[in-house]
Image (tube, helix red, strand yellow):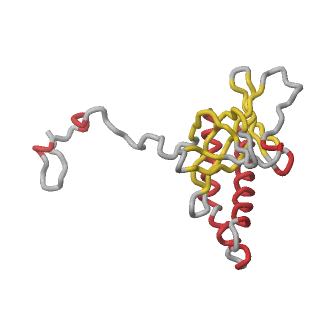
Amino acid sequence: MEQLHQLADDLRETFDERGYRIGVATGQDPSFRNSRRSQASLTRDLALDAIREGCGRLGLHCRSGSGGSLEVVTLVGDTYRHHRVLKATFDKASEAYVIVCRGDNALLAADDASVYPAESWVFAYTIGDDGMLDEIFVAKVQGVTDGAMRQLILGPVTLLGSAGTMPPSGFRPADEADLGLDDDEENEGGVGGAV
């Protein structure tokens, strides 16, 4: 799972460094702003490019599928996890992530030649109101809903990346008394008295 956290950090870093170019590109012509399709397409292209680069750097296996799809393959224990890269939305009413299936190719088929069992997962990202990357997560795919607008049924979601989960950097003594400073002995310069 650590490599997937690092991959999410790579994706976020790419958007921090190059994501502004999406706005620059869509700003070149008013027709690019009539709908969010141009922006969504550029966002997807940037995300897939960053994931391919990150997989190469981290030694993760990724493979392309039909329709320009991409999946990241990891081996956990004796099971291959096929993480399909997909865009998700967050439904505030149900407080759940939603991934709409488009046709039968929503998930790549696992390699039948493998001696290990395979599971379908998603490596998904959401886009904020500003059109930029918001959240990144993985979840096991447990099925697909019925009906005209089919959606993936997801297992528990694990948010990825170190943003907000890293402890503050810098030295922190276990006890402030270890610093050798005493508030009662401060001199005019604000430094503790020396013995």
Q: Is residue 140 shown above or below 8?
A: above
Q: Nearer the viewer, residue 21 or 188?
A: 21
**Residue occupying the far front of the picture:** 147
Occupied quadrant, residue 4: top right
Occupied quadrant, residue 177: top left
Residue 133 image point, x, y percent: 61, 55
**Residue occupying the far left of the picture:** 184
Query: In which quadrant will I find the C terminus?
Result: top left
Residue 175 image point, x, y percent: 26, 33
Horizontal arrangement in the rendering, residue 104 relative to residue 53 (left or right): right
Q: Residue at x 64, y 49 (%)?
A: 125
Q: How many marks?
A: 0
Residue 41 image point, x, y percent: 74, 61
Q: Is residue 81 shown above or below 169?
A: above
**Residue occupying the far right of the picture:** 113
Q: Is residue 174 shown above or below 87?
A: above
Query: In which quadrant will I find the N terminus?
Result: top right
Q: Residue at x 73, y 38 (%)?
A: 144
Q: Residue at x 56, y 41 (%)?
A: 159
Horizontal arrangement in the rendering, residue 22 relative to residue 71 (left or right): left
Q: Nearer the viewer, residue 152 or 4?
A: 152
Q: Residue at x 73, y 66 (%)?
A: 38
Horizontal arrangement in the rendering, residue 3 relative to residue 63 (left or right): left
Residue 88 image point, x, y percent: 65, 49
Q: Nearer the viewer, residue 58 or 15?
A: 15
